[in-house]
């Protein structure tokens, strides 16, 4: 035994002081009695040997000295060198990505991960101290150096997957920190290998136990349902593959409670393929899953769709010459167009979309707006009519200009507008905007500085395409942005109709789950059940529009599909039950404990035993 | 230990009342000497006791011919025997006796003086022995009142010494070839050896009377708080944290000890009388011992 702080032995002088105080204490008054017979009848010790009488007489002092010595010894930090058998570390990293928690599978993929982990601990993990890291969005160390297999089994049994992609970099960082502090060992990653690790050093001494349904690199990308010409439903299921090989997969769909239909689809390597189901019967939501060929199990998570139930957009063209705009709008589905002279403009009219041609009203309507060639001096846009050097124009990557041929723009024929704060430019002329869009005080607004009639645009195919794109973006009846895919557990940011006062949301079972009062920008959810939801926008009880949106269950297609990490199985653990290491063991806590026990014994002696004699 | 000479005395009025008392015996004793005391045995004294039918072998000189003349049946007269009673006093002279609010040894000597006077008045023989761990001084036998002055002189010379032991002195006394009689053992019984010695004299055939002296000092727990108790005989020490519970325990110990001693005496055929030294000797002799049947 060694002492880390031998200077503390100086305090042993206190023992001498304690003994001196004891000896100098006031003596008890002596009383001579005829006999001690009646005083010590229950105390046979008093008639014992001289030593025991002395011990009893000075027991309190002895106990106090013992306690003091124990405390002083603990201050001296005693240390004992012990031989300890060190077990190698085995860190299990279980990929808890949301894609492993697909609820429609016969056996959830994460259960296969847990089963593989349990099997691995029984075989390769014998003689190891097992730590477990659950890799989710925020990795969690759920077990640290467990030696008992029962405890490991219990921990693994109660694990569940997360709701999103796993941060494997952070999970492996935790695992490596355990290996660094211990005597070595290995890391076993239980995953389908579809994860990314920022630092290759994190994969040192790590190996992959690959888990998968055989579909790990295939995912459903889109599910689209549309009525065909015969009036039945046509369903298109887009499947993407990140596999380096051509794969065959079974695509199954089910509409409502109808019988499941499936077909086998060949998916080329690193490409997409579409499975088309014609003449689909049934009503209700459409659910699509992928399965291994000829297998009922091992499916990916489901994707959902529903036949579009669009409401009609009521549009007004405020122009002296509205015909070109009315024609372009009229060919679009689900829209009713009306041309109105600027003199008859009424901001209180109930239109969902206004097209203003060379006219900017003083009072803006509560609707989406598309402005063409706003005149200079209007109260809302700073128009510059002296644009020079406007060619070439710069088009940004905007959906509004998707498939729009801009060659109609002739030099010197355009004006430009200073880009307001609330917008983003789509087309730039000489540092200013020829086209921009944004949310202007709750209104989806597109502003074009040019006149499509004067520019000759109305005579090109670009004009109806542009109008289609503009209406598609500015449609106020669609509160859920269409470009985002939402998953179980997500909340949705909504873009309500400017006239909307309430928003009602109905879940896939048809139950109204949420009614939201429209104040400004708002959100809905989070949603816990995957499927197709209905959303109704209301204006003081009047239905403005109804739309559907889909909450997807997490599956392989919902997450980025990084290329698979190629890792060998984990390296074997050192044979035997571990190496023996000599390490110091601090004993000061035991000395403190001993002192407390002695003081407790003294208390008992003083208050119980001695008082009883 | 008291160094002063003791001077036991009996007041004249008390003496007059003592003269009418006798020490009661419950059974005959084997004293071969004939005395003035009626015996439980039938003997040849002139005192008539009873009649019984004649049986062959009886002394025909004892036939009452007058009854024969009246009843034509033979009866013989039964006469009482007369015997000399030996009375022994064993006085505990240990150090614990020579202390107390009322000195227990002085009290014991006064008690012995009174009882001896009764015995001498009845022409019984009186022997006195003092003991502590063994038998110390002895005197007697004294017979008749003419020996009273010598007896009192001996009692005046008694000194205390040593520890109390009941076993060894009783065995030593029982081993003596003396006539059986009545033994008065006067002691505080504060012996660590227990009460085993009390039954030894009874087994030898003596009628034993234990007069257990209890001083106020023995009966109370008046020592104060946090003291060191010293045994006056052995010098042993015990530290005591005085509190209510220790007083209760002392009272319980005392009560249990008295009960055990009394029960033990009853079991071995010894008459037991606790005597508090606060009580006047006259009251003990004239009332309590008469009520107990020791005197009559």
Image (cartoon, rainbow, N blue to C red):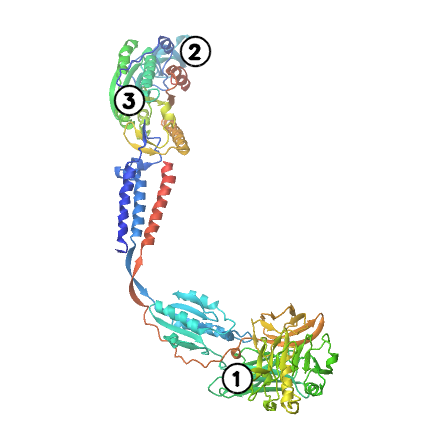
Locate residue B110, reporting x and y percent.
33, 16
Looking at the rendered structure, whether the residues under marks 2 and 3 are on a common chain is answered as yes
Q: Nearer the viewer, residue A536 or A168?
A: A536
- The CA span between labels 2 and 3 is 65 Å
Q: According to the image, label 1 marks what residue?
A: A240
Q: Residue A480, relative to residue B22: is it above or below?
A: below
Locate residue A28, reporting x and y percent.
32, 32
Find out whether the residues at labels 2 and 3 contact each other: C-beta distance under 8 Å. no
Find out whether the residues at labels 2 and 1 contact each other: C-beta distance under 8 Å. no
Sort mark 2 into few (<14), some (14-19) or many (20+) by Cα contacts within 10 Å: few
> Which quarter of the image is occupied by the N terminus of chain A?
bottom left
Sort mark 3 into few (<14), some (14-19) or many (20+) by Cα contacts within 10 Å: many
Who comes first in sequence, dot 2 or dot 3?
Answer: 2
Task: Please state which of the two labelled residues, at mark 1 or mark 3, is closer to the viewer.
Answer: 1
Q: According to the image, label 3 marks what residue?
A: B93
- The CA span between labels 1 and 3 is 120 Å
Residue A301 showing in the rendered view:
yes
Q: In the drawing, what numbered circle is on residue B72?
A: 2
Task: Please state which of the two labelled residues, at mark 2 or mark 3, is closer to the viewer.
Answer: 3
Give the SS element for disc 1.
strand
Give the SS element for disc 3.
loop
Q: Nearer the viewer, residue B286 or A2?
A: A2
Give the SS element for disc 2.
loop
Query: Disc 3 sits on a residue from what chain?
Result: B
Find out whether the residues at labels 1 and 3 contact each other: C-beta distance under 8 Å. no
Q: Nearer the viewer, residue A49 or B169?
A: A49
Task: Please state which of the two labelled residues, at mark 2 or mark 1, is closer to the viewer.
Answer: 1
Query: Disc 2 sits on a residue from what chain?
Result: B
Left or right position of B170 against A129 = left
Residue A261 showing in the rendered view:
no
Locate residue B157, reporting x and y percent.
26, 16
């Amino acid at each position: 035994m060694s002492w880390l702080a031998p200077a503390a032995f100086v305090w042993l002088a206190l023992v001498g002081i304690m003994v001196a105080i004891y000896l100098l204490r006031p003596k008890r008054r002596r009383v001579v009695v005829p006999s001690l017979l009646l005083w010590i009848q229950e105390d046979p010790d008093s008639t014992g040997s001289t030593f025991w009488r002395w011990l009893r007489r000075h027991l309190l002092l002895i106990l106090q000295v013992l306690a003091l010595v124990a405390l002083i010894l603990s201050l001296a930090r005693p240390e004992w060198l012990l031989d300890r058998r060190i077990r190698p570390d085995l860190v299990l990293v279980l990929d808890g990505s949301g894609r492993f928690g697909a609820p429609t599978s016969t056996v959830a993929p994460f259960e296969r991960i847990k089963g593989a982990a349990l099997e691995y601990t029984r075989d390769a993990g014998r003689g190891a101290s097992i730590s477990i890291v659950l890799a989710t969005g925020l990795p969690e160390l759920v077990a640290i150096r467990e030696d008992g297999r029962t405890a490991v089994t219990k921990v693994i049994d109660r694990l569940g997957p997360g709701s999103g992609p796993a941060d494997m970099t952070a999970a492996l960082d935790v695992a490596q920190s355990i290996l660094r502090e211990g005597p070595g060992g290995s890391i076993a990653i239980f995953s389908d290998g579809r994860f990314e690790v920022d630092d290759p050093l994190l994969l040192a001494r790590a190996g992959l136990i690959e888990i998968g349904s055989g579909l790990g690199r295939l995912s459903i990308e889109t599910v689209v349902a549309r009525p065909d010409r015969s009036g039945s439903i046509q369903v298109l299921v887009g499947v993407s593959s990140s596999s380096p090989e051509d794969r065959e997969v079974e695509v199954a769909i089910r509409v409502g409670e109808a019988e499941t239909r499936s077909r086998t689809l060949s998916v080329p390597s690193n490409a997409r393929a579409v499975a088309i189901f014609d003449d689909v019967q049934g009503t209700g939501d459409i659910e699509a899953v992928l399965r291994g060929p000829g297998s009922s199990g091992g499916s990916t998570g489901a994707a959902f769709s529903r036949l579009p139930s669009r409401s009609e957009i009521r549009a007004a063209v405020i122009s002296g010459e509205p015909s070109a705009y009315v024609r372009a709008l009229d060919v679009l589905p689900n829209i009713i167009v009306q041309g109105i002279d600027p003199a008859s403009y009424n901001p209180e009219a109930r239109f969902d979309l206004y097209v203003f041609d060379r006219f900017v009203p003083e009072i803006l309507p509560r609707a989406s707006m598309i402005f063409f060639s706003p005149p200079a001096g209007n109260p809302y846009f700073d128009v510059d009519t002296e644009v020079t050097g406007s060619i070439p124009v710069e088009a940004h990557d905007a959906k509004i200009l998707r498939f729009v041929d801009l060659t109609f723009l002739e030099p010197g024929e355009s004006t430009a507008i200073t880009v307001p704060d609330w917008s983003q430019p789509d087309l730039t002329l000489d540092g200013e905007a020829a086209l921009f869009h944004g949310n202007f005080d709750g209104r989806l607004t597109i502003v074009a500085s040019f006149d499509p009639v004067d520019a000759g645009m109305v005579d090109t195919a670009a004009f109806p395409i542009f109008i289609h794109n503009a209406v598609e973006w500015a449609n106020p009846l669609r509160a859920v942005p269409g470009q985002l895919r939402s998953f179980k557990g997500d909340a949705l940011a909504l873009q309500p109709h400017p006239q909307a006062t309430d928003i009602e949301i109905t879940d896939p079972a048809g139950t109204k789950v949420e009614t939201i009062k429209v104040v400004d920008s708002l959100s809905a959810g989070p949603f816990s059940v995957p499927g197709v939801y209905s959303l109704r926008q209301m204006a003081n009880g009047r239905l403005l529009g109804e739309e559907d949106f889909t909450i997807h269950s997490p599956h392989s297609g919902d997450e980025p599909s990084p290329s698979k990490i190629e890792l060998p199985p984990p390296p074997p653990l050192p044979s035997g039950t571990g190496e023996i290491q000599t390490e110091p063991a601090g004993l000061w806590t035991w000395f403190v404990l001993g002192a407390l026990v002695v003081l407790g014994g003294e208390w008992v002696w003083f208050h119980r035993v001695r008082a009883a004699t | 230990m008291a160094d002063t000479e003791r001077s036991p005395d009996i007041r004249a009025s008390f003496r007059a009342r003592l003269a009418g008392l006798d020490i009661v015996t419950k059974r005959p004793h084997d004293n071969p000497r004939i005395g003035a005391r009626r015996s439980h045995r039938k003997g040849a004294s002139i005192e008539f006791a009873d009649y019984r039918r004649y049986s062959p072998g009886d002394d025909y000189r004892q036939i009452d011919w007058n009854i024969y003349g009246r009843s034509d049946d033979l009866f013989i007269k039964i006469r009482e025997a007369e015997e000399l009673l030996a009375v022994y006093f064993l006085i505990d002279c240990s150090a614990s006796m020579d202390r107390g609010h009322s000195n227990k040894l002085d009290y014991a000597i006064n008690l012995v003086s009174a009882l001896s006077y009764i015995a001498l008045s009845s022409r019984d023989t009186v022997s006195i022995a003092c003991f502590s761990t063994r038998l110390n001084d002895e005197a007697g036998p004294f017979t008749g009142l003419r020996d009273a002055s010598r007896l009192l002189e001996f009692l005046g010379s008694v000194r205390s010494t040593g520890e109390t032991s009941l076993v060894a002195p009783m065995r030593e006394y029982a081993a003596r070839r003396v006539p059986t009689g009545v033994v008065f053992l006067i002691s505080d019984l504060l012996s660590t050896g227990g009460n085993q010695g009390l039954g030894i004299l009874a087994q030898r055939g003596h009628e034993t009377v234990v007069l257990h002296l209890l001083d106020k000092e023995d009966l109370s727990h008046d020592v104060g708080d946090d003291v060191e108790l010293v045994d006056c005989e052995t010098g042993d020490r015990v530290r005591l944290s005085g509190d209510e519970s220790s007083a209760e325990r002392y009272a319980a110990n005392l009560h249990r000890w008295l009960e055990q001693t009394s029960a033990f005496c009853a079991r071995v055929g010894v008459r037991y009388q606790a005597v508090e030294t606060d009580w006047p000797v006259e009251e003990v002799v004239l009332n309590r011992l008469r009520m107990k049947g020791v005197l009559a």
